[in-house]
Amino acid sequence: MSPDCGAPAQTSSRAFFSSPNFNQLGGKTVNSKRLYTLVVAALLATLSILPTVARAQAISGDIVGTVTDKSGGAIPNATVTAENVATGVKATTAANDHGDYHFGNLPIGTYNVRASSANFADATVSNVVVELNKTVTTPILMQVGQQVTTIEVTGAPPPINTTSSQIENTFNARQTADLPSASIGLGVLNLSLLQAGVASSGGVGAGTGPSVGGQRPRNNNFTIEGVDNNNKGVTGPLVQVPNDAVEEFSMLSNLYSPEFGHSTGGQFNQVVVSGTNKFHGKAYEYFNNRNLNAIDEQTIQSGLTSNPRYDFNRMGGQLGGPILKNKLFFFGNYEYDPLGQASTVAGGTCTPTAAGYATLAAITGPAMLSATNVAQLAKYGTAAPSGGNCGNVNATDPAGFPNATSSIFVTNPSLPPALNFCTPPAAPGSCGTVPGFTAVDVGTLPIAAPNFINYKYLTTSMDYDFTSKDQLRGRYIYNSAVGVDIASNLPAFFTPSPTKYHLVTLAEYHTFNSSVQNELRLGYNRFTNITSSGNFAYPGLDSYPDLIFFDLNLQLGPDPNGPQFTIQNLYQAIDNVSWVRGNHTFKFGLEGRKYISPQSFTQRSRGDYNYNTTDLFLHDLNPDNLSERSLGNPVYYGDQIAIYSYINDNWKIRPNLTINLGLRHEYTTIPTGERLQQLNSAATVPGLIDFSEPRAPKANFAPRVGFAWSPGSSQTTSIRGGFGLGYDVLYDNIGILSLPPQLSGTIDNPQPPVINNFLANGGILPVAGGIQTFATLTDQRNNTANHVVVDQKSPAAVQWTLGVQHTFGSKYTLEVRYLGTHGYHLNTQSRINVQPRTDATHFLPTFLTFPGQATLDALPNALKCPVAGCPAGITSITAQPRIIPAFSANDFVNNVVQFTPNGNSIYHGLAVEFKRRFSNGLTFNTAYTWSHLIDDSTADFFTTVLTPRRPQDFQNLHADRSTSALDRRHRLSVSAIYDVPFFKNGNWFARNLIGNWSILPAYTFQSPEFADVQSGADANLNGDSAGDRAFVNGAGVPGTGTGVTALKNSANLVVAYQAVDPKAQYITAGSGSLAFPTAPINVANGILPVAGRNTIATRRTNNFDLAVAKKFNITEGIRFEFQAQAQNVLNHPQSLPGFLNRVDSIGFTGSAQRNALVPSNGSFGKFQDVFSSNSRILQLVFKFVF
């Protein structure tokens, strides 16, 4: 088997050069160097032959417009100048024969635009705001004569887009600094949730950011100042910029210019604050601790009565200004964020009480418990102070009777067999027996695990304007996070975890003439991370394994993902061009990337042993849920080269109609480590499976077509539409978990069969490192656990949109748009050689009531027959083939895992946005989205238990097509900034003591995330419990669940199951208990589950955040600011997966959340017990601004 079930590798960074033993592993350095040389040559050729300047909206904005006279006639060849109000830097261009002018690559900020021409008076449009990734249309009206005219525009651009179909939203420095959600989690990225067309990622845990237009969060693209900021290991952003150092944040949604690519979701862009002609700066602190916050339900579940330690201070300072006035500017921001806290465990961790441990010590005899295992449980799982309060235990005892004492149960053969529970009209005693068992008292263990993380952020910028035609912009950003890895359940297993980040960019802009501009941008990004597994020892084992007990919600062992390290280095070069010719504005560019990224992550390298019941562990039997270990620990190289190119034409057919035509091409090589599949080429079976070196797709052409039409001449309405195709990337975690058997393999030995003295005999034993060889081809195929698709396909999405924007008066804008997307070639995880043993003919039925012995005796299938064979007319389900015969005939007898590009999604959404631009102290944005997202796969790694990463039937992915875990049918957000006008114009004391208040509310309503009701075990006998769903009783009481008991025929063979509670809506598929010769196991076998995927709704979001700010102006340029920011200010309990107002990736892989989805568990449907209630968090802010 392969390491296909584990969590993804942690984020990390990369070394500069490959290992000296690279060629020994089969790498092809010559080809990589040759391709790298071609990339450099192509970029140099671009620079030498193109008289260019890029309109690189990735880090800037544009101003376009038409110069006309009073009659509407064009004024050709007018001289137009745009002057930055803050820096005094000027850009000059000339209008063409149609009177059209264009400024590209303008740093974001406020500009005065001035036009002059012979026989006309100069005209100036003041306060034109250039925003990130936007084109502002500014018409200039000139009058005949010598007088100077000035046209004043309020401090914002026209709120509708009349030149492109691109969907964008921009947040300025005021919003990034003051809105409540911008200062928590991932900072300004959270503001993306305040716009239409997005949905929170909930508890999916795969990727970062919202789901944008129905795309997976992994499909989001993150840049800072135009430099790639993506983690190529697991996706998501790397470097973070403090919100006070962000000048502007922009998110492009789904349909965008072809100069943007890499991903098919949102394009998240940030630019940092720059220096100006005046020295400016601030000192600030964000203060939050336990005494300010309401207590969370999870804290109470952990047995605590008050908040554990939480002390978080963000302390920073910044300074910017001129070095040479109007020429050279600097800016620097440093922030230090010490966090000290004590963590609790979701759902509450349970352990035996002192009485419970005494009960275990008293169990002696032939089935004596393992002294070593009991000792390890007692050593780390200290006794709970009281019993009867564990919500994770099974709802019934092994015989099917209610678990009234909330105990766990241990098999005790010294006791007589116990009668199974029977539902009337079955006679008591007619449903069989189970071995004797003893109840063990357990309770919630209060956990407040102390830990810390110290964050450091350095953000710097430099801008040098040589001349009006040449500018140089440089940025350096450094992040550090040094603290404690708290991924373990118990604090005794915490270990240190350092992480470092660097980002550097240098961009040069040159204007050749009014028609041609060029931008050259160089970037470098580095990231390093180390995850340790500590020095813990388990008697008799070579390393401390990862032990999970679902009935206790307890994990023993260090971080399940350790040990590992990651290093990522990115070298990036971009050249962009803008060329205005007649009615056409052409843009084209070329980008080259070189990644060097060594990393080491062997999934389940210490052994993962997951037990549905602690009983099996105490008897030292192999686990019944998961028993896997990956062998070998090679260094994987994610080294790649990527080449992107694009061309675009904004064709202004008429003054009020623009057509956008573009084409993008992306080519990314196969990672070096993934190419090592060729080591296993001898195992190839033509027509069945091919282990050749994977080949990268070369035909990733992405067309973009759009239009923007503003009827009439008022430019108050814009009708926009478009169509586009985009591609995404495949991340390193896929390759690092798909190594050939020569480098790594996985052993799997869950029940059945039962293995006695499992851990005493070493569990799954390790093997020596290095390249493995095999004596025979049969051995090689037997040990093959992974396969990489040879002709790879990039994830892709087709997107289409049509919308209308309209302005009301001078302040309000309404936009209504439809967006559709279709994702295909999405990454899924599968075992390509495995099929279920159950099908429409071979399965064991589940009855709501006892069917009668005659019915049971007439059933044609049994779970398992004696060695001597099945009685006449009976078929053994366990005798059906699990491995597809074509594979087993060629010696592939273990699971072969493949990440397959066969996932699909379809999204339809209606988005409505109503905005007021800032005027008279008030701005607001209301965004509503109605949408429906359907897919057949969402998570592709073990990032969540809410929607399994693998289908129920590996050979029938279509059967998993359903409402997506990312579907949020309704979403409404309202945000505002209101500067209270009272006393603003009074005397100094009135303004500062009574006035100068601001109120910043944000409200969110969102439909719930849907999750998968699961059996929690291998119901269809395909060797995998991840995707097996339960039954739905259409007549059952909504939201209720129950387990089953096994029913036998007269030949003492299990032939059916019976629901313990016939009135329940959800019924676990075959989780009744059976006695095996040595110990009982949970039989989750032989059932054909019929429930659909993602059928149970969690909880909805209904959240109100509020910030209140007070300013004290000392002088005109110096002030103090005080703020109180409250998340969930009403303290409304919202026990739901994920965050209320943050885009951080959070996955739920713990036993508590799984238990809430298993109908037979006492926690089923009790989401308030397993998810945070998101209690109120209050943060105080102080700023000194000058």
Image (cartoon, rainbow, N blue to C red):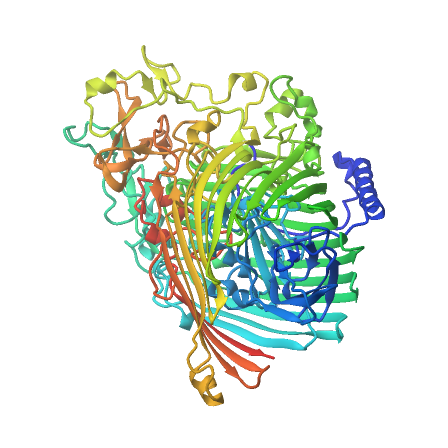
Q: Is residue 637 shown to the viewer in this render?
A: no
Name the residue: 61% across, 79% down.
1186
Q: Which residue occupies the foreground of this view, 110 or 132?
A: 110
Spot occupied by residue 656 in the image (x, y as percentages of width and height): 58, 48
318 in relation to 647, above or below: below
209 in relation to 1079, above or below: below
Name the residue: 47% across, 71% down.
920
Name the residue: 56% across, 28% down.
896
Residue at the extreme right of the image, as rendered: 48
Spot occupied by residue 259 in the image (x, y as percentages of width and height): 66, 46
Spot occupied by residue 565 in the image (x, y as percentages of width and height): 64, 50
Horizontal arrangement in the rendering, residue 688 relative to residue 97 (left or right):
left
Numbered circles on residues, count: 0
Q: Is residue 475 shown to the viewer in this render?
A: yes
Residue at the extreme top of the image, as rendered: 872
Q: Quadrant of the N terminus?
A: top right
Q: Which residue occupies the foreground of this view, 1173 or 78?
A: 78
Q: Which residue occupies the foreground of this view, 363 or 897?
A: 897
Spot occupied by residue 1092 in the image (x, y as percentages of width and height): 36, 33
1038 in relation to 678, above or below: below
